[in-house]
Image: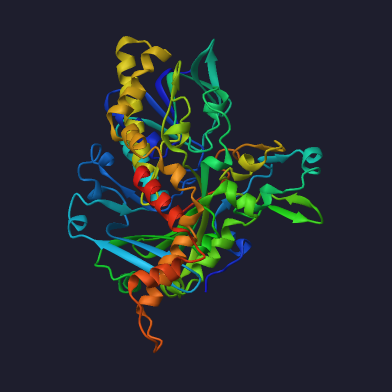
Amino acid sequence: MNQKFDAIIVGAGPAGCACGLTLAKAGMETLIVERGKFAGAKNMWGGAFYGPSLYDLFPDFWNEAPVERYIGQHKYSLLTENASFSFNFSSKKFGTPPYNGFSVLRSKFDRWFASQAEQAGAVVAAGLEAEDLLWDGNTVAGIKAGGDDLPANVVVSCDGVNSLLPEKAGLRKKISARDVKQGIKEVLQLPRQLIEQRFNLREEEGVAWEFIGTFSRGIPGGAFIYTNKDSLSVGVVVQLSELVKKEVPANDLLEDFKRHPLVENLLSGSQIVEYSAHLVPVRGKSKLPALYTDGMLVAGDAAGLTLATGLILEGANFAVASGIAAAKAVIRAKRTGDFSKKSLSCYPELLKESFVLKDLETFRRAPGLLENPRLYSQYPELVCELAERIFSNDGKKRKKIGEIFRNSRRGKISLRQMIRDIFQIKRSL
Amino acid sequence: MTPSSIEDKLAVNKYDIDKDRHILIKEEICRKCEGFPCAYACPADCFKIREGHVTFSYEGCLECGSCRIVCDKEAIEWTFPRAGFGICYLYG
């Protein structure tokens, strides 16, 4: 019989590491298994981490963690084939501790995070896959990994969007293509100074730049550029079901995006060093799977805990917070020695107390809004045409903005439709 | 200019390719499919449409799981590669 752990965590991503670290600090016997060669080997994201959930674990986070740049600027651009309309927010406040967010590369970051859990006393077993669950009647009693039975009081499934274990436990069904976005990304190397010049950044400062527009061919989603120390993270995140329906691989959209005149200049002279892909669960609160059962909890992407509002796309922050909440639930259960479903039911309560389920509730209508195809083609076209007409001088008599607007709108979108959309935006965001 | 084809992009990635494939295709179901959702969903171009059917190679797989999700005929038996094998991101 192998040693029985208080908790076995499957997956050493942000949820698993936050959970493992919290448990180990509380003196729990904790094992984190990770199928990659090292923590982070299988993980990618767009590239920015926001919010304070890590500051609870690391008060001096930005000095300890391998962050790339602090996010001092947020940019949004609407693109048509030949034009762009951008707005930019920058704030000195975002540039001073505790900062608002950072660009981060996962391979380095997850390795660091796992090493912190290890230092706190958790055992991190990389290169080990949880092949199946161990059962004691209807109770999850551990995992099978590397040919061994590894018993535990609780299994915390932090194994990401494709999480196969909760499916086996009957906690969820196969996720639908409508409920996920596919993210693909290139990491493009570019000298540090050139990045700072091109993006108008101070030393250590970074920009999170989001794009929507005609490059996505009406498919819900957008593109992004995040600046790292000496590379750029450039990619698209688009609804998987629509890629299939429109028969367009995401790479075609990424290439269209990269060839846009605004973008092409920013990327010129860069060298690709990695091409990656990942899915993001985006259905929000309406389709959360069951979060716990006897002897098992689910956290992070595996639990579908992400927030996508169009302006915000956050997953890691929610993963960390849900990992911590799962750890707290295990610690409580340990006190009574009862790891049943009833005893673990404090987990969703803890999530409700934190921003995790509160934010998902606040923005519960956002997933519906983001399926509105007009956001990705008609509106960017309308805004760019409007700007072009306002700024251009063709030697003819000028018109007032109201008339320009009517002319630009004609044939694209009815006033009634527009009013309806504005109400939908107001209701959702 | 950075490469535009998926094949050239995958060439810069680090893989430890296992000798056994981690994704199995049920040929008898696959052959009857007409929509080929996997071919459009796969970001690594592992599924190629050739002469009216799909050919599959696992070596460039990025383990995103898209093919498994879009195949509504359940023709794809999808698991992760053996621990330690497959894609190994150095940036992420």
For this view, does A346 lie left or right of residue A174? left
Residue A266, position in %: x, y? 41, 72
Q: Quadrant of residue A194?
A: bottom left
**Quarter-of-image position of residue A361:** top left
Q: Quadrant of the C terminus of chain A?
A: top left
- Kindly indicate the quadrant of the structure image that contains residue B72: top right
Foreground pick, B26 / A311: A311
Q: Residue at x 76, y 50 (%)?
A: B54
Label tally: 0
Classify A135 as above or below A81.
above
Q: Position of residue A17 (x, y in %)?
A: 37, 36
Q: Is residue B22 left or right of residue A3?
A: right
Is residue A39 visible in the rendered structure shown here?
Answer: no
Find residue A234 and report its horizontal and vertical position in percent.
45, 61
Q: Is residue A301 above or below residue A412?
A: above
Who is closer to the viewer here, A194 or B39? B39
**Could you tell me which residue is drawn at 52 percent across and 40 percent down?**
A179
Residue furthest toward the bottom? A395
Foreground residue, B70 or B18? B70
Is residue A162 something that shows in the picture? yes
Tell me where residue B46 appears, x and y as whole percent: 67, 52
Relative to B71, is A399 above or below?
below
Residue A257 versus residue A249 in the image, above or below:
below
User: How was this image coloured?
Assistant: rainbow
